[in-house]
Image (spheres, grey):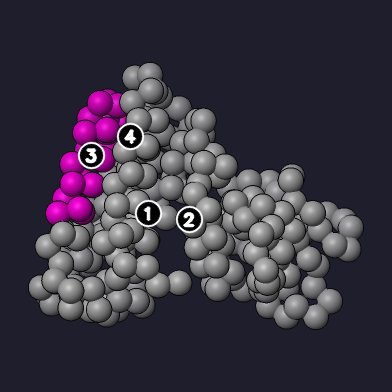
Amino acid sequence: MTVDPLVLMTDVDQATERLIRTAEALDDGAVSAPSALPGWSIGHLLTHVARNADAYTNLLTWARTGVETPAYASAAAREDGIEAGAGRPLAEQIADIRAAHERFADAAAAMPAEAWTYFLPSTGASAAAVPWARLREVEVHHVDLGREYTPENWSDAFALRLLREIVGGAQDLDLVLRPLGLEHTLTIGNPDGAPEVGGPTRSIAAWLAGRADGADLTVSPAGALPAPPRWK
C-alpha cells in the first residue's frame, strides 16, 4: 500500500496530538503506574514515544544527507534511555514528546523528493516508510497507555494498513482472515484447512497485534481462537 509520506505526516501530527491530550489528562503520579505493556510503567511508555521520534529523525537525516545516522547508538543505549527518562515528572514527559515530534516533523519537511527513495539498510526499506512506522508507533502505544483510547479509535485506513503489515510479516501460523467489508480474504501461511477468523478490521488487527483478546471475532470451525503470531 503506497501512501505519500508527507500525507502520512499529517496523520502523525494528529495522532501525536491525540496522545498528548490523553497524557495531559493523567495525574502527576501516573508516570509510575503500570502501562498495558508488561514491565513498563506509563513513564517508560511516554519516554519511549519521545525517543522513538528522535530515532526516526535520525533515519530521515541519514536519508537526506547520506551520512550514516543509526536510529539508536545501540540496543543497550535504547533501553538505557527509556529507563533513564521513565521517572521524570509528567509535564516534562509531555514536553519531551512534543519537542521530539517537532524535530521529527522538521526533518520530514526538510526531505527533498529524491531523499524519500533512499534505502535505509537498518530498516530494509526506503525512507518513505518512516512516517508510517512513526504513525504505527504512536497509534499502538496510545492504546498501550491503558486509558480510554482503544483500537476502536483507530481509523479504517490505519487499521487496514496495520492488518496488512502484520499479515505480511507473520510466520508459524496458518490462518484465513475475513475482515468485514473487505471483498477478499487475507491469509497467513497455508490456507488449506486453516481456521477462518472473521470480524471488524480493527478487531482483527488489534488481536493480531496483541492489543485485544479477540472476544468479538468469530472462528470457523467453531472453537477457541488460535494463538496469534508474536508481533512487536
Disc 4 and disc 3 in contact, CB within 8 angstroms: yes
Disc 2 versus disc 1: nearer the observer: 2
Q: Is residue 232 left or right of residue 208?
A: left
Disc 3 and disc 1 in contact, CB within 8 angstroms: no
Question: Which residue matches tag 4?
Answer: 20
Q: Main secondary structure of the magenta part?
A: helix
Quadrant location of the N terminus in the rendered image: bottom left
Compare marks 4 and 3 and give the one earlier in the sequence: 4
Compare marks 2 and 1 and give the one earlier in the sequence: 1
Q: CA distance from mark 4 to mark 2?
A: 19 Å
Question: Which residue matches tag 1?
Answer: 135
Question: At numbered mark 3, what does the secondary structure look like: helix, strand or loop?
Answer: helix
Q: Is residue 222 above or below residue 87?
A: below
Magenta-drawn stretch contains 217 = no
Locate residue 157, reporting x and y percent: 49, 57
Tell me which amino acid carries mark 3: Arg
Residue at the image point whose x is 16% and y is 50% from the top: 103
Disc 3 and disc 2 in contact, CB within 8 angstroms: no
Disc 1 and disc 4 in contact, CB within 8 angstroms: no
Q: CA distance from mark 2 to mark 1?
A: 9 Å
Tell me which amino acid carries mark 1: Leu
Q: Is residue 99 left or right of residue 125?
A: left
Bin the neighbour count of mark 2 within 10 Å (Cα to Cα): few under 14, some 14-19, many 20 and up: some
Q: Is residue 60 above or below residue 20?
A: below
Disc 2 and disc 1 in contact, CB within 8 angstroms: yes
Task: Say whether residue 126 is visible.
Answer: yes
What's drawn in magenta, residue-wise?
77-106
The mark found on residue 98 in the picture is 3
Tell me which amino acid carries mark 4: Ile
Question: At numbered mark 1, what does the secondary structure look like: helix, strand or loop?
Answer: helix
Compare marks 3 and 2 and give the one earlier in the sequence: 3
